[in-house]
Amino acid sequence: MLLSMATSSLEPGLIYGLMALGVYISFRILNFADLTVDGSLTLGAAIAASVIVAGYNPWLGTIAALLAGLVAGACTGVLHAFLGISSLLSGILTMTGLYSVNLRVLGRANISLLRSPRIYYDISRTGLPEEMAVLFLSLATLVVIIYLVNLLLETEVGLSVRATGDNEQMIRSLGVDTRYTKIIGLSLSNGLVALSGAYVAQYQGFADISMGIGTIVAGLASVIIGEVVLGAGSVWRGMVAAVLGSFVYRLVITLVLWLGFKPTDLKLMTAVLVVLALASPQIRRLLRLTPREAG
Amino acid sequence: MLKLDGLWKYFNRNTINEMVALRNLSLEIGPGEAVMVVGSNGAGKSTLLNVIAGVFPPDQGSITLAGTDITSRREYRRAAFVARVFQDPLAGTAASMTLEENLVLALRRGESRRLRRAIRAREREFFQERLASLGLGLENRLIEKVGLLSGGQRQAVALLMATLKEPRVLLLDEPTAALDPKTASLVTSLIQRIITGQRLTTLMVTHDLKQALELGSRIVMMDAGQIVMDVAGEEMAAMDVDDLLLLFEKGSGRRLTTDRVVLAQ
């Protein structure tokens, strides 16, 4: 039973793992709770779906989704860094605007991909068993993305982005214009989230205007669960943890459904899960499981 | 080297809480001078440092560095010339990043950051050599997170970071005030080595008059946004803490009253 649940959680866990990587970058590296992701996940799905339905190569649709996500993230970055809008509100504004954009892209509330080609088909054509295609492709994508992002974050630019999230005053005094590093980080984050959206749409066979709702909470849940399981350490480790957390999160969802909850209850479950994870130090203190600090 | 001309800085201007932090302040600092800025709380010492670093612009007046007017340059564009150490030992380093990552960020101070691998063997060697000169054993902890170091170690690293790429002007904002006495004296001796060894043009805010006499080649005392006393050279060399206090009273017309200054005697 548990094994079959684990295997059925693996695929969405990995695909949404791309999204968790994006949230890890904005939330943990940039220290920016970015609500844009609710819109950019749908944006990625919408763009990939409409490109595919229009008869183009699904890979083209997937790349286009990634690029659109990069732009969406940059929008939030510009609102925050250049127009001085608070981080939370910048994300909300872009997310709200994206709702209309996504409807325009989709043309209607949802697009079905049931009879359309998808990136996974190309993989199964190479001789890999069909049921392995999704797993293989999403895993391969994750490995490549984690490698590339890690490489990027070890460059001078990447270190500046990380320092911006850690100690903005310091990195400004070292001559970095933090407006740009924030835009770079947010752009990268939302690019990955949109890429995840494109994978999701092709995995589930449709893109829907409301599929992005709650993405940020699911992403935070994944990041935090991952840290609980694997611990926080280097960036590399944090990214692997986020993906692992994404898998555990999907597993929890499957478990909750199996317990008899309705799919519509899931958002509440997720919210409670994130509250528990974020508040665990406070809760532990209230329950006096850890001694109070002196002074 | 550094020329401040008629600086004014207001906070909450045209409100009931208006406060003048700098009042027509002019100061010229020659190359290699180590100027100690002392004065009571609220005298405008930190504001002065912030205006020079470009955290905020002055409301009036100009700042010239090595012949270039930098008054309206933003903070990150002054970093090529101006390096800074903050009072809070945690403020000068990024806790979640490793020691070598912090150092390489400082090594490229004021340069445009590129898409190339930040740390290579050459940098690592250089960092080890410079860390060894601190004498804290940090040269073997390059890939440890800075958050694991003590406050004093972090302040020493911050000081090293400020001078890793030699600045035209070094700004120190009470760098030892938040440290315990033992670490403070260690950091003080590091500052001493930088000032006398590298002959950097330095502007340091301190509450510790004894320290000011030890480290400075010139002492400037501020009160209510103005410079009320300015001593250097032989005149300064012949002074002790009591002489400084007396001089301050003469200049400002009142006693220097902060508990920290009193304690420092």
Image: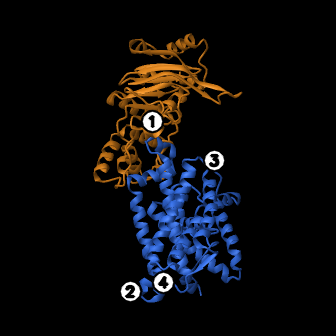
Chain colours: A blue, B orange
The kind of residue tagged 4 is Pro
Distance CA(mark 3)–CA(mark 1): 33 Å
Callout 1: few (<14), some (14-19), or many (20+) C-alpha neighbours within 10 Å? many
Distance CA(mark 4)–CA(mark 3): 63 Å
The kind of residue tagged 1 is Arg
Mark 4 vs mark 2, foreground winner is 4
* Of the pair A276 and A127, the residue shown nearer to us: A127
* Badge 3 and badge 2 both on one subunit: yes
Q: Mark 4 points at which residue?
A: A117
> If you read the primary sequence from the N terminus, does the residue marked by circle 4 or circle 3 appear first?
4
Q: Name the residue under label 1.
A: B84
Quarter of the rendering occupied by the C terminus of chain A: top right
SS at badge 1: strand
Q: Which mark is residue A294?
A: 3
Q: Which chain carries label 3?
A: A
Mark yes or no: residue A10 visible.
no
Q: Residue A53, image x and y in percent?
A: 52, 79
Q: Residue B168, image x and y in percent?
A: 37, 31
* Badge 4 and badge 2 both on one subunit: yes
Q: Mark 2 points at which residue?
A: A126
